[in-house]
Image: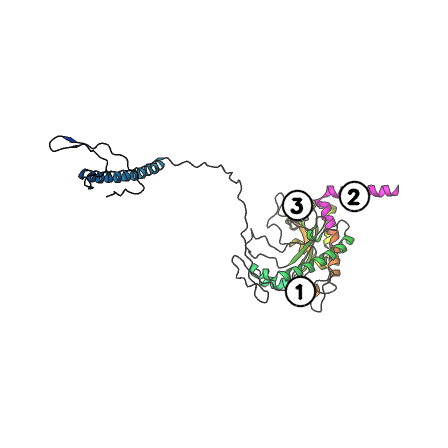
Amino acid sequence: MAMTRPKRTTIRPLKKAQSPAEDGSERQASSPPSSVSEEDGSESEFSGKEESDHEEEVHDESEEGAESEDGEEQEESEDEDEQPPSKKRKVATLKPTMKSKTKKAVSPSPTSEDGEGTGTGLGSTFIPRIPSPSPGDTPYKPSTLHPNTLSFLSLLSKNNDRSWFQPHESHYHASKRDFESFVDTLQHRLTKIDDTVPLLPVRDLVYRIYRDVRFSNDRTPYKTYFAAGFGRMGRKGGVWAGYYLSVQPGGKTFVAGGKWHPDSVQLGLLRRMIDKGGPGLKKLKSIVEEEGFKELFGGLDKLCQNEDRLKVAPKGYPKDHPEIALLKLKGIGVSSKRWPDEEVCGEGFLEEVVDALRKLVPLVEFLNGVCVPELEEGSEEEEGSEEGEDDE
C-alpha cells in the first residue's frame, strides 16, 4: 500500500535509527520508510512505526519553524519597542514684539424682504438709520440757519446719549452742513471788517460736537450747541485774541470776543497794563464803555462780573487796589446778548452777527497789541516799509 506524504513538505532521508533493545542489543533499520516487503506485500512493522515517527518529526519541525518565525517577529517588535523614541527637532520661531491688533470679522446682518436689516446676524449690531427731516417750504441757504438745525440741537439736549444719536446721524450731518455753510459765509464777511483774519478751511473754524468727559462730572457725550471760532489761527486761537459764535436753541445763541485763558506771560502783561493805569487802561475802558458796545455786550460792569475770575487778589497785588476787579480776571472777554430762535432762523440774523463782530474789532486789536507786542510792532514796521517802497 502506498504511503501518503504531507503536502508542501519535503521528506528528508532518515538517518539510521538506533533504539536500545530489551536485551541490550542495537537494531538497525534495513529499509527506508517507504519500503514494502516483496515476499508477502505487507508493510513491515518497523517501516510503519518509522513513518509515524517521521510524520511527527516533520510536524514538529513545521511547528518549530512557525514558532521561530513568530519569535523572530516578536523579537524584532521588542527591539523596536526598546529603541528610544527619536527626539523631534525644535524649530526656532520669532516671538512678536508687539501684539497685533486684529479686527473680529463681523458677519453682515440678514435683510428682510423689504431690504431693511433685521439685526439677527452673528456678531453684528444693526442700528436703524432715521432719515433727516424734509426742509419743507424753507430751503437751505448759506446765509441763513435752517429751523431743522435748531430742531436737531433741541432733540439732542433731551436725548444726549449714543443710543439716540447714532440712529439720528443723518439729521446731525444735515444740520452740521447747514451750520458750516453759514460759518463760511460769515468768515468772508469778517475778513472785510478785520483784515488780520485770514480765510481758512471751515474745518479749522468749527468745533467738534463731541465733549471731552475725562475730567468732567457731566458724562453726557455731546455738546448741545454748534460753535465756531474766528481769528488769525481759527478756532485754536493760539496767542491771539479772536471771535466766537455759539448757536444753541432755547434763546441761548450769542457772539463773543476777546482773549480767554491766556498763558501766564500774557496774563502778566494784561495785569501790568491794568496796574500801571495810563493810556492802556484808558483805551480799554473807552472801548468797553462805548455806547454801541455797551448796549450789546454790557460794558465794564459786566466785564468785571465775569465768572472766570479769582476770588481773591492775585499774588503781588494789594486787596485794596483801585482796579482790583479787573486784576482778578483770568482773561478779558465779553459776550453779547442772546438771540431768540425765531431771529436766529430769520433772514437778518447774518447781518446782526456781522454788526456784533464789527463792534468787537477794536477790543480784539487792543488785546493783541498788549498780549503780543513784539509781533504787532513787527507787523506795523513791515507795513510802514511797504508803504515807503510804494511811495518811491
| Front disc: 1 or 3 | 1
Alpha-carbon distance for marks 2 and 1?
46 Å
Could you say whether the residue bearing mark 2 is in a helix, strand or loop?
helix
Q: Percent position (x, y) of residue 30?
A: 20, 33
Residue under numbered circle 3: 267
For marks 1 and 3 on the same chain, the one whose residue lies earlier in the sequence: 1
Residue at (59%, 60%) from the top-left corner? 166
Q: Amino acid at mark 3?
A: Leu
| Front disc: 2 or 1 | 1
Of all residues, the one furthest to the left in this rendering is: 23
Alpha-carbon distance for marks 3 and 2?
23 Å
Q: Tell whether position 35 is magenta.
A: no
Q: Is residue 250 visible?
A: no
Q: Amino acid at mark 1?
A: Asn
Most common secondary structure along the magenta stretch:
helix
Magenta range: 364-392
Q: Is residue 19 visible?
A: yes
In front of the other: 203 or 232: 203
| Depicted 362 relative to depicted 92: above or below | below
| Depicted 214 relative to depicted 41: above or below | below
Q: Percent position (x, y) of residue 314?
A: 62, 46
Could you say whether the residue bearing mark 3 is in a helix, strand or loop?
helix
Residue under numbered circle 1: 148
Q: Which mark is residue 380?
A: 2
